[in-house]
Amino acid sequence: MIAAIKPSGANTRGLLAYLYGPGRHDEHTDPHIVTGFAMLGMPDPGRDENATLTQLARYLDEPVRLRNSEFGKKITDHVWHCPVRAAPEDRHLSDAEWGEIAQRIVAAAGIAPEGDDLSCRWIAVRHADDHIHILATTVREDGRRPKLHDSGIRVGDACRQIEKDYGLRRLKKGDRTGTPAPTQAEMHKAQRLGWEQTSREWLQDRIRAAIPHARTAEELLAYLEADGIAIKARRGPSGDLLGYAAGRPGDLNKDGEQIFHPGGKIAPDLTLPKLQARLEAGQPEEHPTARRDRPTTAWHQATEALDSFRTDLADASHAQAHIAALGELLEATAQKAPIHHRAELQAASKAFARAQRSQIRAEDRAAHAIRHAARDIVHTATGPDGSALAALIAALLWAGIIANRWHEAKGHAHQADAARQALHHLQAAADQALTPTLVVLERRQPREETRRTLAHDVRAAVPDHADRILTDPSWPALAAVLADAEARGHQPHQLLKEAAAQRELATARQPARVLITRLQHTSRNPSPNPRAEAARRRATVPLTGQQPTGTQPPTAPGVQPNRPRR
């Protein structure tokens, strides 16, 4: 059940005209009052043919008129409007039930607290099966104004209890970190102008897309202006930035002037102070996860930056920072990935935006490595090769799983839902990115004898998951990766243990695929391996009385012909 409080100015008669009218598309049927303040003597134009909307408006506005006549400054914001809607799958509620629900909502809001005979005047009008409209005038019978601060939170809590009591669809409790819902006026304007999104939704997407490109709030605003977005900066006497508002091109008021939305009204985490905390946190001199002994690309650095994601979530403030930074890295990857991979990544980034914010204060300095990686990606001039992209998306998928589990453990229902939605898109993107690599690897799978030897490595390194790995359709491709890694000087047994420690396999849908992406990332460079070096020498240096290696029968790529058994 959703109750959406909407301040509606001072025109009680005008709102009544809508509630009792036919609706915009003749969807209103049988409008009538189901309950209200001091029902005795209240005119109901829906049930009494002699009652008029003007009479009902005067009845509701009487305390307002009395107060305005006693005080010089008139009240012009006294109309309180709250539509209350059941879910489509909910059962049909009777007028009596809707009346009880309305009474609980106005009590929770502070419009008419239980047992208060001097509260505000209000009515609940039903003109459809699935919802009612509560209209109140916010001046009490004693002339005072009701205390409505945080009424939306109290009403939301009341709706969660109503759902439980009436057996209705149970929604998740709000946590005040969601973006404000679009108003009817915003949605109608977007429809009229042919826009797929309202202005605030559009601006939110553009600002989030710009964050990885900037190191300071000033850079961010400059980037947005260069992208054609109208920016109005608020500055102090010293010129310091104190706040900002953003406007969508073409979003004008009735006077033809640009409409601006403050950052906090666009999304709770897009206020200037929160953006400054994320962008301007102290930066270490060197990327902490970068390996100093070799050059690496931005794509590989990003995967390495996620290697410690699980351990970085031990502290709540650090965890919140890392999850927010994960969203920035996901956005950066979506922007710079090859075009045929962008749709799923962009959908994942959009869904994950809700998972990036909670009520836990983030220690943004802790997540510098991931943010640094995101900025490197958006500024890199070269795209990733297939294995680098597959490894990064697989790392993003695993980090998203960890973020989802963390939110679930903290009871962050909305954030956990958002992370789950993002995971669906990331899984599709991971499958799409890895498929070309699998095709090549399966064509190059090593010979049966080598696969049997590698299977022993699997059983020794990850005994708990060996059966699932060896029966995975991608096992031949994994065997090819292991053979290639050994040819470069790695020990397959050790690589498998490290990969399994980095990403648990119990929940992996296809564990061989998970290992392939991890191994292709970690085995890119040779490491000392005397056994492999000896095998290489035997394969390339002819022994006395033997033919040169080049005259021997060919072997599968990456497979050592005389690999000794353990």
Image (cartoon, rainbow, N blue to C red):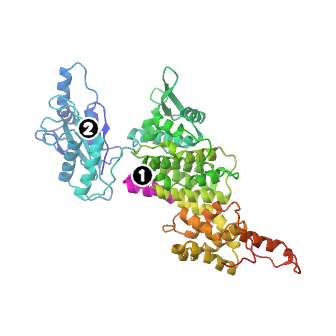
Q: Is residue 520 left or right of residue 139?
A: right
Dot 1: element? helix
Residue 372 position (above or below residue 511): above
Look at 51% across and 56% down and name the residue there: 399
Q: Which residues are magenta?
A: 404-424
Q: Is residue 368 left or right of residue 151?
A: right
Q: Is residue 271 something one can see in this rendering?
A: no
Q: Position of residue 510 (x, y in %)?
A: 54, 69
- Tell me which amino acid carries mark 2: Leu
Q: Is residue 434 left or right of residue 158?
A: right
Q: Residues within 10 Å of mark 1 (few under 14, many from 20)?
A: many
Look at 19% across and 31% down and name the residue there: 58
- Of 523 and 358, the residue lying toward us: 523
Q: Position of residue 207 (x, y in %)?
A: 52, 40
Q: Is residue 8 something one can see in this rendering?
A: yes
- According to the picture, the residue beneath numbered tag 1 turns out to be 415
- The image quarter containing residue 60 is top left
**Identity of the residue furthest to the top in this view:** 72
Label at residue 271: none
- The image quarter containing residue 303 is bottom right
Look at 81% across and 79% down and name the residue there: 553
Q: Position of residue 106 (x, y in %)?
A: 22, 42
- Of 22 and 412, the residue lying toward us: 412
